[in-house]
Image (tube, helix red, strand yellow):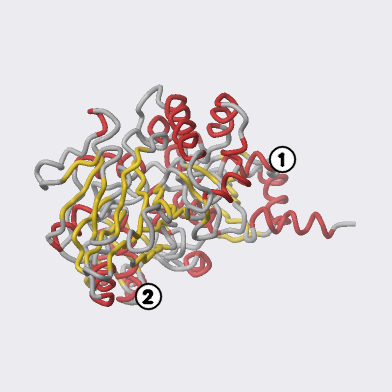
Amino acid sequence: MLLRRFYDDKLAQASYMIGCQATGEAAVVDPHRDGELYLRAAEAEGMRIRYVTETHIHADFLSGARQLARKTGAELLLSAEGGEDWQYAFADEDGARLLHDGDVVTLGKVSLRVIHTPGHTPEHISFAVTDRAASDQPLGVLTGDFLFVGDVGRPDLLEKAAGVADTMEAGARDLYRSLERFRGMPDYLQIFPGHGAGSACGKALGAVPTTTLGYEKLVSWAFRCGTEEEFVRKVLEDQPEPPTYFAQMKRMNRDGPAILDALPEPTRLDPDALPGIVKGGGIVVDLRHRREFASGHVPGTLNIPWAADFPTWTGWLLPYEDDVHLIARDAEEARGAARDLALIGIDRVPGYFDAGALKAWSRTGEALEETAVVDWDGARRAIEEEGALLLDVRSRSEWSEGHAPEAVHAHLGTLGFRLGDLERDRPTLLYCRTGNRSGIGASILQAAGFTDVRNIEGGIAARRQRERASP
């Protein structure tokens, strides 16, 4: 039997290729839109992709299942569980085979048995994997967003992110029953989850790639709850804010993700075109590090550095209906950023500007804009002497764990919706944990016309370090 795991660090998302090496048949489970990854792997392993499937209608990335099935001619397998409100709208058009609890998908000597595991979403299914050449008992389960290492899939996303009212508690109770079903399964079963640490599909996911059911029964808070009521209370408390783009992903993945023939290859744009785009209200994302951006940038541009959390913050902050232009160091960086955007369904990327665009702006006679960077001493003086506003742009849970007493909370992902509550001419200081998120937030305020914006370098971590060092 072949089992290959593909992990995208920026999405904190795992997909899998399961196959029978004797027959050369394989299935790909939960693929993202970078389909070449799976095609190269299949070729290297001497496998033919016969089936493409997924565990549920994803909210955190745009599914590549439909696309990969069309490209390879594989049969698309989709869940038929969850009731009529949770069916794939494109299933008939794509000739998909619908899966129910107990169905078995066969790949030579390997089989995948469908287990309906609702809770995270109503239609969610898991796949018990059996290598029948070795045993008639399953060796493990692909659990998608149902069971993670140290955690379970959150049941509140349908209500909080997709706006489906009165589904949180019902989802939590479904999730409890799904866990109870697994409680009676053998401890030796390996658990292959769909996400790792950093995913917003849970609240405390472990960084270890896999686990066993027995170990989760032993250590996971979810299995250690004594009653259903205790589980419902704990699974719903302290869940992180769901990114705003999750609702968009749900709709797109249910109704039919757009097909990409290939990953985007953004073209280099004429630097002289940048001023017209910016002054016309176009969206331009500068991919540079926050310190480079702070030292000089084109007014009106956003700073979302091309880093590990790039897909998350672009999903939070960028509209899906508008073109997104990039400022990148080179073609490779632009290509990588466009790929990340494509994985969350942002396909309207006409091209990128390189460093020459900053010179082109200067030729217009207008100066580049800077972002003031201060330490906590400078912040204190600004608050005391200038009446500056201090904004904490971290998550709600981080804020609850401790914050500067003078601060006002404004989660970075929702900062754009809070602009009307803020005074544009008042000195505004921003901080996060280290300075990265507050750097993004500073660019949002400056692009919106705020005249005095300052980023606190080092964030709350620097403040706490200083407090510990004080006698």
Q: Dot 2: within a 10 Å radius of its alpha carbon, few (fewer than 14), some, or many (20 or more) residues?
A: some
Question: Residue at the spot x=58%, y=58% of the render?
Answer: 435
Q: Position of residue 66 (x, y in %)?
A: 19, 52
Residue 377: percent from left, percent from top: 73, 56
Q: Nearer the viewer, residue 320 or 420?
A: 320
Numbered circle sitting on residue 292: none
Residue at x 54%, y 34% (from the top left corner): 235
Res 459 visible: yes
Helix, strand or loop for disc 1: loop
Quadrant assignment for the N terminus: bottom left
Give residue 367's position: percent from left, percent from top. 41, 66
For badge 2, the amino acid type reads Arg
173 or 256, which is in the foreground?
173
**Which image quadrant for residue 21?**
bottom left
Q: Earlier in the sequence, mark 1 or mark 2?
A: 2
The residue located at (27%, 77%) in the rendering is: 44
Snapshot quadrant of residue 224: top right
Quadrant of image for the C terminus: bottom right
In the rendered structure, the answer to whether residue 50 lies left or right of residue 205 reads left
Residue 329 circle label: 2
Label at residue 405:
1
Q: Amino acid at mark 1?
A: Pro
Which residue is at the front of the view, 170 or 176?
176
Q: Position of residue 463 (x, y in %)?
A: 72, 55
> In the rendered view, does 79 fall on the left or right side of 302?
left
Question: How many circles with numbers are drawn on the protein?
Answer: 2
Instruction: Examine the rendering and report whether any part of residue 265 can be seen.
Output: no
